[in-house]
Amino acid sequence: MSKKPKTTNLFVYGTLLSEKHFEVITGKDFPRVRAILQHYKKIDLMDGFPFIIKSRDSAVEGEVILGIDKETMKKLDRYEQEGELYYRIRIKVATDDGMLPCEVYIGNIGHIQHKKLLMGIGADAADRVEDHIEEKIEDFIAAAEQSTQEEVKMQKRITKELLGSTIEELIKAHFDWIGMPQYIITKNLEEPGIPTLEHIKESKDILAYADTYIAFAVRHMIFNQIEERVRRDFRSMVKIKNPYYTHTLSILLALHYMNQHCEEIKERMRKKNLDTFHPDSDYTDYARGAIVIAENLYNKVALLEYFNWLQENKGPGFLPLGAELEFSNLGRGAVDARPGEDAAFDSFYYFNDFDLMRRCWKLGGYIDDHRYITPDLTRTRGFLEYALGKYRMVGDLSKPVTDDPCILSHLIREAAFFAGVKPHSMHISIQQTYQPDCTKENDINDLLCLLLLGGDISLDKNGVLREKRIYYREIFDKYKSITFLRENRHYDTEEKIEKKANRIIEYQFPRLASGKDYEPLILALKGYQISATPRPLCLDPRVMLKTEKWPMLPEISQLTAWAEHPSTLGDDVIGRFIEKVEDGLMHEGEKGPAHSRKYIEICMKKIAEELYAMNEYIATSGSCPPATTS
């Protein structure tokens, strides 16, 4: 007769009270009963590390998890770091059925304080569970045998960097797939695996551009490492509520820091030979160098100063916002460029040869050739695009970036500087909360005011004034519609059911310029969207495919004619537009404005100044365009 497996009853009073957290950690669930531990006191600082201490006149309320098997206890011991952070001892607790023998984790206060410092300010129970899952996944990352502890840590960091978003996706999957089997983890870590540069060494065509691509990759790896440190050190400060992109604030801080130290980074890369391709080096060597530079460069105090400035100047609203940024050294000729025309990147033809999608994943980086709805891994010439908030390329999953125009404007400006490629254009997206009226014609004067704020009104090579985004047909689609104002669908989960898609209005006309303040434009677009509820000038491609014929709207021909020879707008036209924008902003919230009235007043003044300045430029037409705001 076989012996009954030995089980353990465990009294829990902190993180493990959450059945969800318990299941994520162990993959199992067990019956529970309420219980009280006498003569102990709970110390809970809301940081994920509660503990208990002896106290004669106190008691701790909790639960006893019954019948835990030996293998599950091993998982719990690892989570609690038994013998280091906590000690497991035997006790008795009071239940409704009498006294019950069980075990409990007692905190090692000194070690807990040290662990809290390592996790960063503001770490909570969910962060602690995520870190535990990350450590579990790291166990499957191979490290060199007989390595020192520091080298093992470095090998893990190198592997995590080169795996891109894989680790983060596996951590999230643990919360959706309780008890994820080991083979799933192994498969995701091994496929497609660690990138190599061996094939680069054998191709003369790629070698001609290898130096530029390597430098581009290394800069993004340094950025990734700094962003990771920011999220660790400022956990509570950079957390973003759902449904927004998790990394919004941390990538903004990291981009700003990278840009502030761009010359120093270039010099450090040059000294370590990380800005050129070396046939005797592989991707792991470049990743190691990037990690070392990031560690030596990182300064928590300097980052805190910028974060505090952001806190003082931010202005959260109600409607979710997003942005996609396009870059090309050849401008509008990126997609149809001849081989070698772009001397630096060959229009990013070898982007995937250098595994750059996994280097740029935090910024949603990929190559947009204006032919495919979602990116793939084939070679193609096109624009470098940062689709901010796009957290998974395969499957085209994205989240809005923020509800704060100030944050979005700074993110756009920092990303435009960081890319190191000539900025070209951008899309500003606003998530809809209503069904737009697709029959009412837009007031063409409103659209022209938007062009004054965000278009590219300047002299062509012959000295003739044009609105270049429309005149050069940069925002025309194959249906001959202008993608000035487009309805789209974004998915933030893998459940691609139409009713679960977020309805998005994308304004695709703005020109992207380095150093420009886009906050007035973002506020104007939002206020106009709320007040005027404009109809889109083209639909989402998935809707277009089901439409036999999309009518040629009068706004399209009107915009085209104006773009060929821009003319000034009357003060009354600009005045009515300003009134619409302000009216929209004053009704963004459920019962009034989402922003403070003072913030709206300041932004409205900026909007008016930019409108009249560009109108004056059109009137003089031979002068230089107004300088961008730094």
Image (cartoon, rainbow, N blue to C red):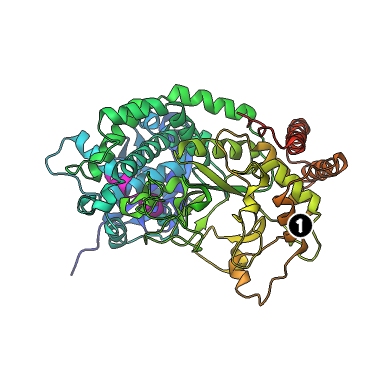
Q: Main secondary structure of the magenta part?
A: helix
Residue assigned mark 1: 558
- Furthest toward the right, the residue is 572
Q: Is residue 114 magenta?
A: no
Task: Tell me which segment is drawn in magenta.
Answer: 159-171
- Furthest toward the bottom, the residue is 548
Percent across and percent down for residue 37 are 44, 40
Residue 311 visible in this rendered orientation of the protein: yes
Q: Is residue 166 magenta?
A: yes
Percent across and percent down for residue 127 are 44, 42
10 Å crowding of disc 1: few (<14), some (14-19), many (20+): some
The one of 588 and 134 positioned closer to us in this rendering: 588
The one of 79 and 363 positioned closer to us in this rendering: 363
Give the residue drawn at x 67%, y 46%: 466
Give the residue drawn at x 41%, y 24%: 299
Type of the residue with mark 1: Gln
Percent across and percent down for residue 627 are 64, 30
The one of 535 and 627 positioned closer to us in this rendering: 627
Which quarter of the figure has residue 106?
A: top left
Which quarter of the figure has residue 12?
A: top left
Give the residue drawn at x 36%, y 41%: 216
Q: Quadrant of the C terminus?
A: top right
- Furthest toward the left, the residue is 146
Q: Quadrant of the N terminus?
A: bottom left
Left or right position of 570 against 469: right
Residue 7 visible in this rendered orientation of the protein: no
Percent across and percent down for residue 501 are 60, 63
Q: Report helix, strand or loop for mark 1.
A: helix
